[in-house]
Image: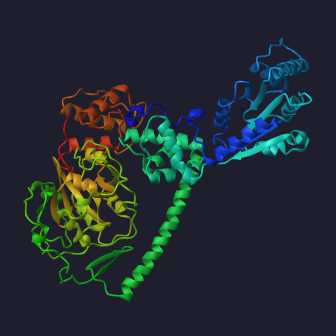
Amino acid sequence: MYLNYFGLAERPFSIAPDPQYLYMSAKHREAMAHLSYGLSQGGCFIVLTGEVGTGKTTLCRNLLADLPDNVDVALILNPNINRRELLETVCDELQISYPEKQSKKKLLDSINNHLLTTYAENKHTVLIIDEAQLLSPSVLEQVRLLTNLETTKAKLLQIILIGQPELNEVLARNDLRQLAQRVTARYHLPALAKNEIQDYVNYRLEVAGCKKPLFSAQALKLLHQLSEGIPRKINVLADQALLGAYAKSQLVVDTKTLKSAAGDVFAKKEYALVDSVFKGKRLWFTLAVLLLITNVGSWWLFGSKPTQNQAVVNGVKLKEERLNAKPSAQPKAEDLTIEAPEQKLEALSLSESTGSKTIDLSKLAEVDAMPVEPSFDADIEPGSVVFSDDFLDSKPIDQTLDNASTDLGKVALVRNIEPPAYLANSAFGRVLEVSSDRTGRVAAFRNLAAAWDAELPDVILRPLCEELEIDGIACMSVSNWSTLNRLNRPTIMVLDHKGTQHRVILYRLVEDMASVLVGDQSYQVPISELRDRWSTNALLFWRPSEVGQEFLQLGDKSSALPAVRKKLDDMLVSLGLDSIGNLKSDFFDAELAAGVSELQRKFGILADGKIGRETYLLINEILKPDAVPTLTRRNRI
């Protein structure tokens, strides 16, 4: 499904034991050396063990592909056999004919005669048994007896036992000590190490035809943690994560997509265990932050006088007198002249300082910004500080490789190059440089919440997104420009200037220019510069309607579907599209999926026929245009 989207020739994370996709880690090379050495020495038994999914079978297939032409191989994949079936399977694999219901002695004689013949022809025979830990003791004893087929100079049959770690326990049994004594090479294949996960994933992607990274660094770290370094788990998770990224029109898998994939592919108990690890880590992190808050709060209260008129620390609001002094290092207006056309910057000075009030983005969007020099004479109130908040999580943002492009439809890739040099001295950069006291997260949250007719409390005791849930507002993280543009909502962006992060609100897009709110002032900035400065995941708000936000797809049955059908039908009819009919049905049928796909194509979003958050956002925007703040008017394709 996602092959063409990512430019892949075939699925890179199939769990089939294809030697072409075998990533030869240091441990795999060591295991291969043990197997090759054991075969070259003509020993009786070679034992290869490893946890489920570590790549034992794939490694064995790779070994078989490298064997010379004079080696015959008998491969047994089903260990649930008895002694007679073992001998019959060996005959079948070596193409030895035998009559039905032949005695075990006759079968063994036939195998011996065949091995003597091939030995005389300078051929070597190898028997490989996979999942050998499931062999019964009696069958293992029969396997040992096969090694008694020999000449005075050499063994006629060499045997490789492949199995899980339990195989070593089986071989340690007292009644199987004769077999254990004949093991000439033994190796345990471990899971991949942390520093190998990136090479493993990228190697498989390259074999499948994709030469660019599709997983962020954080996602790779999480992938190793979730999979415990076991290649089969990595493959299953990575395959599901690529499908999830495709469904969300992402070109890079992030941690959120990977966590969602883990919930889909892991069994409930297994995922609950993984989830508990994350919760445990979050708990320790929270305790550490609370300890830090306590120390900082004590110093703040008793160690020195605050210099801000408000500070929210651990939910406690400290009131102080407003600063009378203006910032000492503020540039003059003439110092902010624009030197290049592409650095066009326009500022809209508001007639009223924010104070304890918030900016009305809806009114701001109605005003055409005037090309005036930015003014810093307003009495600027420093932003508040909140520690107990997980907003923006310090994740690197996806950035475009083509920084000069202003194509809103392009999906960005992870930026691994230095930011353009012009950012250091651009006019907007100098605005950010003197605005660090106006770009705090609380101020940004308050202003964006006001656009949704919501208000944060004066005393903040919970994470900001949880506070907004009281007003029915949900937060959504955005990691690339394409998604931000499709979701079409005012967004809190984190911009970088000389290593310092500033939170601004992007509230309007017009052609190649973006209108952003920095504190209480509005500026027009080239989209190319905004994207070049974007440093970590952005955050937008949306308000789920009465139909909810349940993910729905073909074949689902839900009590929410009648209401969703009605909304979709109203929307389709208003756009001149075909009605979906059967509005009271609680079943997601093909007709509904076709209607959803048609609607998605109309507005240029992923036409997968499924109803997810992006489709809900679109429904809200079309049916209630006056109640939903947007970046731009949708193009109806």
Scheme of image coloration: rainbow
**Residue 95 in sight:** yes
Where does the image place residue 298, in percent across and percent down from the top left?
41, 83
Which residue is drawn at the image coordinates 18% and 45% (left, top)? 625
Taking depth in this image into account, of 122 and 545 the one nearest to the observer is 122
Which residue is drawn at the image coordinates 51% and 65% (left, top)? 283
Where does the image place residue 101, in percent across and percent down from the top left?
85, 14
- Left or right, residue 476 beside residue 157: left
Q: Count the marks.
A: 0
Q: Residue 161, located in which quarter of the rendered image?
A: top right
Where does the image place residue 410, in percent across and percent down from the top left?
28, 42
- Left or right, residue 82 beside residue 409: right
Q: Quadrant of the C terminus?
A: top left
Q: Quadrant of the N terminus?
A: top left
Where does the image place residue 220, in percent across and percent down from the top left?
49, 50
Q: Residue 529, located in which quarter of the rendered image?
A: bottom left
Which residue is drawn at the image coordinates 13% and 71% (left, top)? 335
Q: Residue 461, located in which quarter of the rendered image?
A: bottom left
- Left or right, residue 622 beside residue 159: left
Taking depth in this image into account, of 504 and 540 the one nearest to the observer is 504
- Left or right, residue 438 beside residue 242: left
| In the depicted structure, whether residue 538 falls above or below residue 432 | above
Which residue is drawn at the image coordinates 80% and 16% (left, top)? 96
